[in-house]
């Protein structure tokens, strides 16, 4: 009887755990706290946080419980991440949710979305200089786009072993947009620049909104064919939304599909952060480079907006350049908050949505370019 009790105790998680499991469990609880108490991307942080708890309950190898065991349920669910299935489905939902009106009303603002992708390519070069392999450096650089699905998609193709740390880093920085971006925006702008009021946007016709996803898809995917799985689903979802006749499909894409996939992606990405796999010097380096990438992307957008003002009659508020990262719509909301801190009657949200949405397209193109370049 005594031996049975000892055997039972030796098989519990308490006996199998080491300090790394407890560190990861605390990180998971922190994610859940930030999602619930601070409202930092709760639809992402709560599933990921709980997934971290799931992934860091220590179990015997071979029981078919761990996410990295071939015959486990979690492994089957994780297949949607490692095979790149979940990200395009999320892009389908994003497309069905997105209104491209502000971008079409002033196409010049799309340049800011492109400028913000500088963070991706400069961090790629930095990671190479630090000794990361080209495929790993490309996966790290894409964090600067602040686009979790794109980061997961590219990493699944180029560096599958890094999906856990890269996905958590990407979603962490997406959630912390209201904390990270404002200091950079204020540092790079003057109060006079933050007070700039932008001209009213022109009205966009329904025909333009229907034609755009078709033309946009063809142009972007001819430019970067490797971005086809992401941008194809993004523009298809938007066409479903704008054509009206397929509203039932659009409603499903922006509700049931994206919600289901977000749950599965969040819980499995979180579970992939097993302590023995996740807590490594390499993961720490990824988080540092990811933060650098995100900061460069934010600064690049702001600085390029200031450069554009040198040649424009109707000035643009350089704050909106920070929305060029693809954290939709949080970056645009941050622009609104920072702008209204200077002038409560200055409404920048709709203007900021143009570079914000183009940033989604830009990060997907960036991922496609890196993928084709590495291969």
Image (cartoon, rainbow, N blue to C red):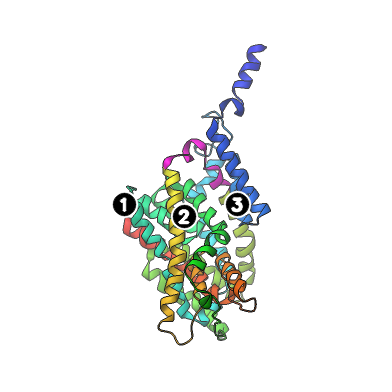
Q: Quadrant of the C terminus?
A: bottom left
Query: Within the image, what quadrant is residue 204 found in?
Result: bottom right
When the figure is inspected, residue 138 is found, relative to residue 280, above or below; the finding is below
- The answer to whether any part of residue 187 appears in the image is yes
Mark closer to the observer (2, 3): 2
Question: Is 34 in front, or is 9?
Answer: 34
* Side of 62 where 129 appears, left or right: left
The residue shown at (57%, 50%) is 266
In magenta stretch: residue 274: yes
x, y percentage for residue 1? 67, 12
- Look at the image and give the residue range highlighted in magenta: 267-281
Residue drawn at point x = 32 percent, y = 52 percent? 128
Residue sitting at x 37%, y 70%? 222
Residue 215 image-quadrant placement:
bottom left
For label 3, the residue is 45
SS at mark 2 in the image: helix
Residue 258 forms part of the magenta stretch? no
Q: Residues within 10 Å of mark 2 (few under 14, many from 20)?
A: many
Residue for badge 1:
129
Marks 3 and 1, Cα distance to the nearest angstrom? 32 Å
SS majority, magenta: helix
Q: Which residue is mark 2?
A: 291
């Amino acid at each position: 009887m005594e031996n049975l009790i000892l055997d039972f105790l030796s098989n519990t998680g308490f006996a199998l755990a080491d300090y790394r499991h407890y560190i990861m469990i605390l990180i998971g609880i922190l994610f859940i706290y930030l999602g619930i108490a601070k409202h930092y991307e709760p639809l992402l942080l709560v599933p990921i946080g709980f997934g971290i708890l799931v992934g860091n309950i220590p179990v015997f190898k071979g029981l078919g419980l761990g996410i990295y065991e071939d015959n486990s349920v979690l492994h089957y669910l994780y297949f949607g991440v490692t095979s790149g299935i979940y990200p395009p489905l999320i892009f389908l939902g994003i497309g069905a949710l997105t209104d491209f009106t502000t971008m079409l009303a002033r196409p010049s603002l799309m340049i800011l979305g492109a400028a913000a992708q500088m963070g991706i390519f400069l961090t790629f070069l930095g990671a190479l200089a630090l000794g990361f392999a080209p495929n790993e450096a490309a996966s790290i650089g894409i964090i600067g786009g602040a686009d979790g699905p794109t980061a997961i998609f590219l990493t699944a193709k180029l560096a599958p072993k890094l999906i856990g740390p890269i996905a958590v880093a990407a979603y962490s920085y997406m959630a912390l947009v209201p904390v990270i971006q404002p200091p950079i925006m204020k540092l790079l702008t003057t109060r006079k620049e933050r007070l700039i009021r932008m001209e009213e946007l022109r009205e966009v016709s329904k025909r333009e909104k229907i034609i755009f996803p078709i033309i946009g898809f063809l142009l972007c995917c001819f430019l970067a064919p490797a971005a086809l799985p992401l941008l194809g689903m993004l523009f298809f979802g938007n066409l479903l939304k704008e054509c009206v006749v397929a509203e039932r499909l659009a409603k499903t894409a922006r509700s049931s599909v994206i919600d289901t996939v977000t749950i599965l992606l969040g819980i499995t990405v979180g579970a992939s952060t097993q302590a023995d796999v996740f807590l490594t010097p390499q993961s720490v380096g990824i988080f540092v480079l990811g933060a650098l990438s995100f900061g460069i992307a934010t600064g690049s957008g702001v600085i390029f907006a200031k450069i554009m003002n040198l040649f424009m009659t109707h000035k643009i508020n350089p704050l909106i350049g920070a929305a060029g990262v693809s954290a939709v719509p949080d970056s645009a909301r941050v622009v609104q908050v920072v702008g209204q801190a200077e002038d409560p009657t200055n409404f920048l949200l709709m203007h900021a949505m143009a570079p914000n949405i183009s940033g989604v397209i830009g990060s997907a193109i960036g991922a496609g370019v890196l993928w084709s370049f590495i291969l």
